[in-house]
Amino acid sequence: MIGIFDSGIGGLTVLKALKEKSPQTDVVYFGDIKNAPYGIKTQDDLKILTALGVKKLLENGATNILSACNSVSAFMVLEEIGLLSDVPFGIVEMINPTVSEFKNHSGEILIFATPATIESGAYQENFRKHNVEIKTFPIAELAGAIEFGADENEIERIIDEATTGVSQDNFDKVILCCTHYPFFLDKFEQSFKKIGRKVEIFDPASVVAETALSKFNNNVGDGELKFIISQDSPNFRKMVEKHFANYNYTIEVI
């Protein structure tokens, strides 16, 4: 069983891609809504939350872990994570599959992400290994606004402010390095059009899902889908119903 970990609804974008590719894969998903959003927390706090999240998934039947939160992905290779279980388990995170997709890119890439993801330096370090130039731009408010169901006008305002802030920069690709952001990928496209920029916007969900399915090829089962959340959320339940109506699933608040 693959355990997917995120601060809330963001990881549903990765889960959706994974289930579309392999409906029979068993998945347990942990959304740590009680502590959301992760993107504005300190690196020390995120290290603790990462270990607690992985532990929850292992306790609920996960045999391998997919971190669907960019803000904690930098901590998924810590030795302490491996010590959470006597049985070895695999780990897939967001950063390496995303970077691999663009390791031969010749232009400059713009990364939109949470402050915590950018402060970790993980994307910068990994792209540097491939001599790929990137520019990072933090959006402090967006993940929380999406997580807690803010009005679309407010979300559009935040995105417009972000695209305006990079309007004069030289880039030809945009990567949405927060799993919450692709829920409003169309808003990013519209916002760039407003400032006269035509760029390719990339959602890493598909390549991350493919990486997990390839690495965890023994996880095909009966298609079990179980959600556990640290705090109840009408918005989480609404998003699950919207995107997973064709699957049998359970939601448990723990």
Image: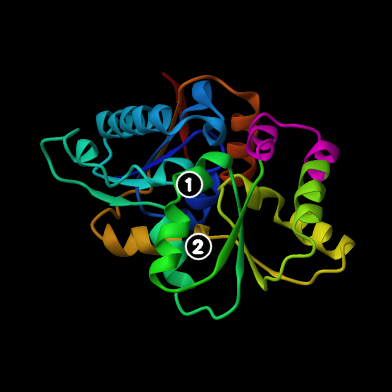
The kind of residue on which mark 1 rests is: Asn
Q: Amino acid at mark 2?
A: Ser
Predominant SS along the magenta part: helix
Tag 1 secondary structure: helix
Q: Is residue 247 visible?
A: no
Instruction: Residue 58: give x, y in percent of width and height.
Output: 26, 34
Give the total number of marks visible in the rendering.
2
- Residue at horizontal 75%, vertical 32%? 150
Of residue 202 and residue 17, the one placed in the foreground of this image is 202
| Position of residue 60 in the picture relative to residue 106 (left or right) | left
* Residue that appears at 78% across and 42% down: 158
Spatial separation of the CA atoms under disc 1 and disc 2: 15 Å
185 drawn magenta: no
- Residue 148 or 82: which is nearer the viewer? 82
Q: Which residues are magenta?
A: 140-156
| Vertical position of residue 162 compared to residue 134: above or below | above
Q: Which quadrant of the view contains residue 5?
A: top left
Label 2 CA crowd tier, 10 Å (few <14, some 14–19, many 20+): many
**In the image, residue 167 above or below residue 130:** above
Q: State the residue in front, 114 or 97.
A: 114
Q: Earlier in the sequence, mark 1 or mark 2?
A: 1
Membership of 144 in magenta stretch: yes
Residue 232 visible at all: yes
**Residue 188 pos. (x, y %):** 75, 56
Q: List the residue tagged with mark 2.
A: 206
Q: Residues within 10 Å of mark 1 (few under 14, many from 20)?
A: many
Is residue 85 positioned above or below 74 on the image?
above
Q: Which residue is mark 1?
A: 70
Q: Residue at x 31, y 31 (%)?
A: 51
Left or right, residue 182 beside residue 117: right
